[in-house]
Image: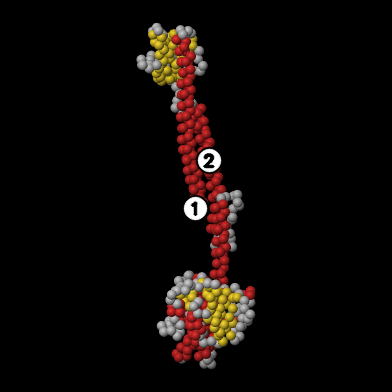
Amino acid sequence: MVKRRQLSFRARRTFATGVFMLLICLGLGLLFLMYEGGKERDNARQRGLAAWNKVEPLIQQERLPPVLSHDHDEAVQVLDPHGRVAAASSQLLGDPPMATFRPPDDVMNTTRVLCPPAGLDGCRTVASISVHQPDGVWSLYVATPTVPWYGSTTAVFLAIGTSLLLTVAVTTLVFRDITKAVQPVSAIQRQLADITAAHLERRVPVPGAYDTYEEVKVLAETVNDTLDRLEAAYERLRRFTSDASHDLRSPITAMRLQLDQAFAHPEDADWPQAAAKVLAGIDRLQAIVTDLLSLARLDAGAPLNGEPTDLGVLAAAELDQRTHGAVIVRHLQEGVCVDCDQLRISRVLVNLLDNAERHTASKITVTVRAENGTAVMEVLDDGDGVAAEDRERVFERFTRLDAARSQDAGGTGLGLAIAREIAHAHSGTLTIEDSDRGARFVLRLPQCPATSETPHQAMPTADTPGRRIWPRRLRAIVMNDRRQIPQRTVDTARQRR
Ligand SMILES: Nc1ncnc2c1ncn2[C@@H]1O[C@H](COP(=O)(O)OP(=O)(O)O)[C@@H](O)[C@H]1O
Ligand SMILES: [Mg+2]
């Protein structure tokens, strides 16, 4: 189907070029023939004029020979004042006058086309010239072959031949040119049609520099670049799906095992404990699903509720909310303004603090400062830190280093991925940087210009009236504060019991 369309495109273009060329050649041919006709007519007129110039003095000098010489195919006849043939060129010897018309009295000569004149054949252009002599008016007739508008048959053949040759040559060139352009495109199209999700490693052929137009080569390279990106994205998606399935299956398997064991010996089973374990499993599932949803929203580019915020005040408010298992040292510079979605930036801090508390030995340092037009928030712990080769990997989805797995089975491996996506959504960065001891996570955000209304007022602190206090449970759910959700769920379960 596609091939037929391509062929018809090629045929249409070639046909159109042929017709166009033919029309141009026809026009040029007509002009050429008209020019040739004009030139031939001029020639004939010159010949007639030459004959006239030669014979007229002979009449005037009364030295007219009976047989007149002629250079080409013109026929000449001289009539005396009585209308008798006094002299003629060789073709008209003994013939009567070739014509009877004469120029009007006030004109010297006149021309007519006679088909044929007496004594000749074919159509001739006959010029009648009056020569005034003392004995009366002599008449001179000069007949030259009538020239058609196209000049000669040779000119017609020349025009037709050249037109056909030019048309065929240009059409062939255009056909070859289009074929040269279309063939690599067909090859690209055939290869693309064969590429499926199962064969994303395949690439379209890139034509050589002299095989086709540069544009087709660039098209093939662009298609291959796109396929590279698609393959990488597909591979990430495949790994993500398999990791997500694996992480979702583990708690389900654990819960099922728990219930299977309890049902095997219902009378001996510690049902409250089994229920608590199942609830913990459900909490883990809930945490994973909530993280996945957060990532999906960030991937989909969910809009931010950006407002000017004092980053130091925001961090202080978050630290005030938490109960810490480690010593927290604050270096929070005030007046560092960022245009941010407060809930999401708090989420970054929560994720970093959760990790730091899990990995620290004793102390966590939280710093907020301005640095060359950039707002910087750092969370530094004094744990084992993250090895240089793992500093990018830990931001990948579901990545949990071995140490973390053994320390705490509760993490989802999505916290840092979410935090980095949030940083990117704010046109910022989140990285792990060198430190003397422990892990140093650095969030950098564009600093907003200072406004008349201080960000303080835009983002009230815990002490100021009107502070936006999220109900604890709602806030925990929105921010996926997992330390609080399980606790609450277990409490509710106990109450139910
Ligand atoms: N402060 C830290 N010190 C050492 N390793 C860390 C720290 N924060 C994160 N990591 C490593 O990065 C991994 C990914 O972190 P994260 O995405 O938050 O997932 P989770 O906390 O659920 O394990 C963690 O499992 C851990 O191995
Ligand atoms: Mg985490």
Q: Can you give x and y, in whole percent of width and height, for residue 182 in the image?
A: 54, 50
Mark 2, other Cα within 10 Å: few <14 / some 14–19 / many ≥20? some
Between residue 28 and residue 437, name the one nearer to us.
Answer: 437
What is the total number of numbered labels drawn onto the structure image? 2
The answer to whether residue 108 is left or right of residue 270 is: left
- Vertical position of residue 225 compared to residue 286: above or below: above
Q: Can you give x and y, in whole percent of width and height, for residue 462 in the image?
A: 45, 84
Q: Residue type at mark 1? A: Met
Q: Can you give x and y, in whole percent of width and height, for residue 153 in the image?
A: 49, 27
The answer to whether residue 300 is left or right of residue 392 is: left
**In which image quadrant can residue 95 be found?**
top left
Q: CA distance from mark 1 to mark 2?
A: 28 Å
**In which image quadrant can residue 111 be found?**
top left
Q: Which residue position is annotated with label 1?
A: 1
Q: Earlier in the sequence, mark 1 or mark 2?
A: 1
- Vertical position of residue 269 compared to residue 287: above or below: below
Q: Residue at x 53, y 44 (%)?
A: 175
Q: Residue type at mark 2? A: Val
Q: Residue at x 56, y 50 (%)?
A: 213
Between residue 320 and residue 275, name the one nearer to us.
Answer: 320
Q: Does residue 470 appear in the picture of this structure?
A: no
Between residue 323 and residue 367, name the one nearer to us.
Answer: 367
Local secondary structure at mark 1: loop
Name the front one of labels 1 and 2: 2
Q: Which residue position is annotated with label 2?
A: 170
Local secondary structure at mark 2: helix
Mark 1, other Cα within 10 Å: few <14 / some 14–19 / many ≥20? few
